[in-house]
Image (cartoon, rainbow, N blue to C red):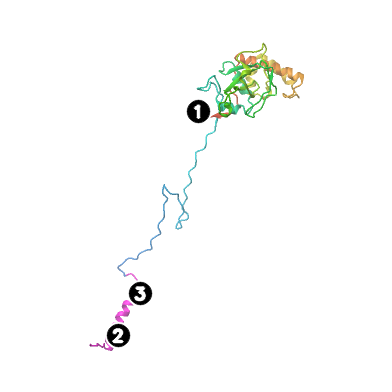
Amino acid sequence: MRTHFLSGRSMWQVMAATTGAVVMVGCGGATPSEPARTAAAPPVRVASAQSPTRVTDAHPEAAVAAAPVAPARLELGRALPTECAKGVEPCATPSKFVEQVCRGRYPDLALSMFSKGTPWRRGYLKVETLEPVNMYDGERGEEWLKFGEEVLVLRTRGPGGHGGVQVSGPTDVDILRWDGTCATIRQEMLAPYPTNTTVFTPRIAWKYLDEPTQEALLGDQWVKNTSAKERPACRGSTMKSPDAACDKASRKLTEAITVALRGGLAIPTPEKLPAWQEPEAQATK
């Protein structure tokens, strides 16, 4: 085996060449002919239609897409029905109207519906007296139903119909009175024709009527005369418990109003109406 020995000069040349190479690698600098590379910006995630937008760490100022807003629910319309509900026999008002009007008190609406020419069924009480029970927890009339009273039949409900289950039993009807209140009674308590020579009508509270309604009613001379007498007679009295003078004057005025409306006196559409009409039904009007 032969061993080669380098001279001192040759040894140093090898070390210098090796050291230079190490230095060049360690510096890692770009040569003048090579352009400097810039650091790449971190990618920004863009929201797609399938995923919600979120703020990235690289760009916290990015706007967050607004959440979809549900369309606003349209309010039920306030309207006065003028025709019988479709597909219902005998003639009746829409069921949603009954449910809403019977939860309140609408004196002007009652006058409009009792007026001459409206399609609503009239009924006349056959029993002596009857307490006005409102199945919808609305206001009740101050006076009990009496023999010969004229009412409007808003809706006929079959046996058990109030709860949606049909069982054997009597038939009920929801009625509207001249004073703007409702009651639910048995159908057999009503006759389709007057049961008395004098038609009874609960007192109509003049002070609770809208001004446009009052002005239209005053176009009838009898209403105008009786109204002028009713105001001073009922000053300081209540409609629930009127004194003798007020009771007499208010009944005269009530009679004048009913006669005028049955005779064809026109009054404007009431300002106060229940909300019951669905938005799609309003669009067809």
User: Circle 2 sits in a helix, a strand or a loop, which is it?
Assistant: helix
Residue 204 x %, y %: 67, 21
Cα separation, mark 3 vs mark 1, equals: 85 Å
Q: Amino acid at mark 3?
A: Gly
Report the predominant secondary structure element of the magenta stretch: helix
In the image: residue 242, left or right of residue 14: right
Nearer to us in this view, 277 or 88: 88
Q: Nearer the viewer, mark 1 or mark 2?
A: 1
Q: Which residue is found at the position 28% from the left and 85% from the top?
A: 11
| In the image, residue 241 lies in the stretch drawn in magenta | no
CB atoms of marks 3 and 1 within 8 Å: no
Vertical placement of residue 75 versus 108, above or below: below
Side of 216 relative to 11 (left or right): right
**Disc 1 designates what residue?**
281
Q: Nearer the viewer, residue 252 or 36?
A: 252
Residue 231 in view here: yes
Q: Nearer the viewer, mark 3 or mark 1?
A: 1
Residue annotated with mark 3: 26
**Label 2 crowd (10 A; few <14 / some 14-19 / many >=20):** few
Question: Disc 2 residue type?
Answer: Trp
Instruction: Tell me the number on the disc at residue 12.
Output: 2
Mark 1 or 2, nearer chain start = 2
Q: Is residue 212 visible?
A: no
Name the one closer to the observer, 205 or 183: 183
The mark that comes first in sequence, 3 or 1, is 3
The boundaries of the magenta stretch are: 1-30
Q: Is residue 27 above or below residue 52?
A: below
Between discs 3 and 2, the one toward the N terminus = 2
- Cα distance between the residues tagged 1 and 2: 105 Å
Quarter of the rendering occupied by the N terminus: bottom left
At a point 28% along the width and 82% down the height, the residue shown is 14
